[in-house]
Image (tube, rainbow, N blue to C red):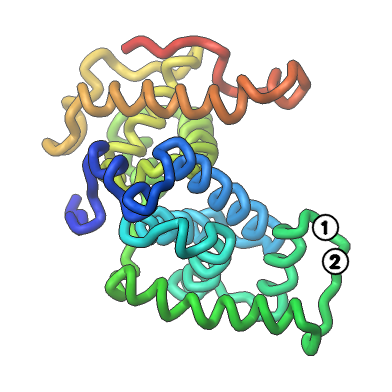
């Protein structure tokens, strides 16, 4: 799988981003990424956008902050703009009026909020989207091609002979880990494989064969996949298990509160 190397970074690069050079701590930047992505997810869900549109938007968002500072650009503004651009790229557009209203609703945490098109807040949000669209496109060097790990899962289902249930669990895990900048650290097929490995690890019925990596492409490093699977579980536990109560939603989680061991 060919991936544009300008959008692949090392973990060390995450400690040398424009935000950090501006005095933002590593922890603050990662929190900002999660906050922006969760906001984007909420807006996307309210607009009933396909998941792949949202994934494209979040990829734009993470790429943007590898080249721009959170001190200069608010995460909500860039998240909203990333989604606005992604709807065009993926040819799944929504009326800008609807996007503006939902962005305002989610930013103010008020789903009943209504805005007239001539209101100050409506005009401000609309101008924000149009203004930052140009900045986003320039920052991304107009490179709007996104290869998504979600698409790679379809190939893995056939190659590794796993059930559709395992693929659904892996898909959900990928979606829940979007706040982490995996898309700028790993190739899409590595991310997809790690998600599937983790999903099957906690399944009593869907297990990968011991030599699963032999059925994959040469550029899939098994040790890298195992390492990423551990990171994904750590992120999932921190953001979805540790901070939640023992509610029915937690009990329905496909991933037990375990430590993943390859």
Residue 249, quarter of the rendered image: top right
- Residue at 49%, 66% in the rendered image: 82
Residue 14, relative to residue 69: is it above or below?
Answer: above
Q: How many marks?
A: 2
Which of the numbered marks, if any, corresponds to residue 21?
A: none
- SS category of the residue bearing label 1: loop
In the visual, does 98 lie left or right of 15?
right
Q: Position of residue 161 (x, y in %)?
A: 35, 29
Q: Quadrant of the C terminus?
A: top left
Task: Confirm whether residue 154 shows in the render.
Answer: no
- Residue at 41%, 13% in the rendered image: 260
Q: Residue at the bottom extreme?
A: 118
Q: Residues at badges 1 and 2 in contact (C-beta under 8 Å)?
A: yes
Q: Position of residue 185 (x, y in %)?
A: 28, 42
- Residue at 31%, 66% in the rendered image: 145
- Residue at 74%, 20% in the rendered image: 245
Residue 38, relative to residue 102: is it above or below?
Answer: above
Q: Position of residue 23 (x, y in %)?
A: 39, 48
Q: Position of residue 49 (x, y in %)?
A: 61, 62
Distance in Å between CA atoms under marks 1 and 2 = 6 Å
Residue designated by label 2 = 113
Q: Nearer the viewer, residue 185 or 88?
A: 185
Task: Confirm whether residue 110 shows in the render.
Answer: yes
Q: Report crowding for label 1: few under 14, some 14 to 19, many 20 or more residues within 10 A (C-alpha).
A: few
Residue designated by label 1 = 110
Q: Nearer the viewer, residue 235 or 91?
A: 235
In the visual, does 74 lie left or right of 98?
left
């Amino acid at each position: 799988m060919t991936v544009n190397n300008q959008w692949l970074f090392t973990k060390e690069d995450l400690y040398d981003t424009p935000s950090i050079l501006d005095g933002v701590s590593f922890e603050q930047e990662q929190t900002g990424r999660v906050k922006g992505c969760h906001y984007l997810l909420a807006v996307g869900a309210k607009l009933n956008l396909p998941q792949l549109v949202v994934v494209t938007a979040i990829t734009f968002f993470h790429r943007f902050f590898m080249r721009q500072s959170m001190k200069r650009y608010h995460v909500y503004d860039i998240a909203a703009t990333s989604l606005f651009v992604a709807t065009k790229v993926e040819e799944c557009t929504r009326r800008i009026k609807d996007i503006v209203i939902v962005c305002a609703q989610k930013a103010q945490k008020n789903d009943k909020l209504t805005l007239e098109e001539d209101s100050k807040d409506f005009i401000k949000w609309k101008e924000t989207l149009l203004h930052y669209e140009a900045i986003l496109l320039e920052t991304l060097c107009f490179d709007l091609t996104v290869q998504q790990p979600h698409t790679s899962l379809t190939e893995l289902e056939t190659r590794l002979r796993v059930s559709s249930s395992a693929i659904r669990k892996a898909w959900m895990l990928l979606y829940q880990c979007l706040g982490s900048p995996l898309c700028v650290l790993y190739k899409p097929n590595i991310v997809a494989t790690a998600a599937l490995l983790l999903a099957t690890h906690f399944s009593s019925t869907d297990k990968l064969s011991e030599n699963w990596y032999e059925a994959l492409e040469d550029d899939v490093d098994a040790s890298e996949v195992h390492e990423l699977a551990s990171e994904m579980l750590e992120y999932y536990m921190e953001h979805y298990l540790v901070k939640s109560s023992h509610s029915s939603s937690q009990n329905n989680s496909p991933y037990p509160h375990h430590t993943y061991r390859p």
